[in-house]
Image (cartoon, grey):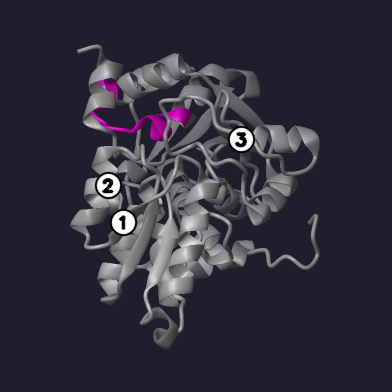
Amino acid sequence: MNDSTLSIPTPNDVRYAAERLAGKVLRTPVLRIPAINELAHAEVYIKAENLQRIGAFKARGALHAVGRLDAAIRARGIITYSSGNHAQAVALAAKEYGIQADIAMPVDAPTIKVEGVRALGANIVFAGTTSTERRNAALAIRERTGGTIIEPFDDGDIIAGQGTATLELLEEVERQTNGEALDALFVPVGGGGLIAGACLATAGTSTRVYSVEPEGCDAMARSLEAGKRVEVPPGPTLADGLKPVMVGERNFAIAQNYLAGSYRVNDDEIRHALRLLLFAGKVLAEPSGAAALAAALKHGLSENTNRIGVIVSGGNVDKGVLVGVLGC
């Protein structure tokens, strides 16, 4: 690892997280969609985290991290900063544990995600448009309330919780194929919690893991190319959940050790993948959730794969965005 003082979760932490989360999160289905298999010229196994609680994989990390807090500390309340799905996940965890949640969200957060946070009873503070502005707002809330910040991605308990989605996918593929493994797994990257967890879950297997980011919001790819974390002011993209300025320190350290490669996709490719999921698979994904499929369709064959895993990370798509994607 790049920093020997940094606390990095292990593959065992993902397995322990799965035990702690049993009964608290849904074991989401792994879907096979014939039309997508034909286009990919491979067997594509789609982990439908759009069907998870709050409509995204983020429920796993938040419920795991909040559940791991000492009860007395947890009672002071929790805080986070997020463009949407992690905000809803933390709000859900707060409701489950009967505590207050304060959430810093961007001023341009999708309406569906703002409404989801409010419906779960959390307090929202709007702060700028970047993850840095949201984090600063969260720090100010902590100074005022004494609550605990639940980091959106750069946290060992969050990473371990997110890794349980990949762990379930691997188990289900083995069950469906009588013990065969995925050749490749495509995972969308924002701050990097999901892919760091995926790397840990696949450690010791033959599965190669690839990161997927929108063009212009490619902090992980650029950091890997530079050999260190770099800031990338996010450009315009449909994938609102994949726009952090910088990937997490722990997430990058894990990715450097485990990732087989990184890919970028454009909005047209994301639109195509979202439409395929909706019309061929009857699966409603948000643009961020469709990004991994976009990369798998574009690059899967070049990786000499027979069995491809794709994580559809969420399904909380804004109505206006969906109408635009469908061309209605």
Query: What residue is disc 1 on?
Result: 124
Residue 30 visible at all: yes
Q: Residues within 10 Å of mark 2 (few under 14, many from 20)?
A: many
Amino acid of disc 3: Tyr
Amino acid of disc 1: Ile
Q: Secondary structure at mark 3?
A: strand
Span of residues in magenta = 279-291
Q: Residue at x 67, y 33 (%)?
A: 221
Query: What residue is disc 2 on?
Result: 114
Quadrant containing the C terminus is: top left
Quadrant containing the N terminus is: bottom right
Which dot, 3 or 1, sits closer to the camera? 1
The numbered mark, 2 or 1, whose residue comes first in the sequence reads 2
| Left or right: 152 in relation to 285 | right
Q: Residue at x 36, y 54 (%)?
A: 87
Per the rendering, the mark at residue 210 is: 3
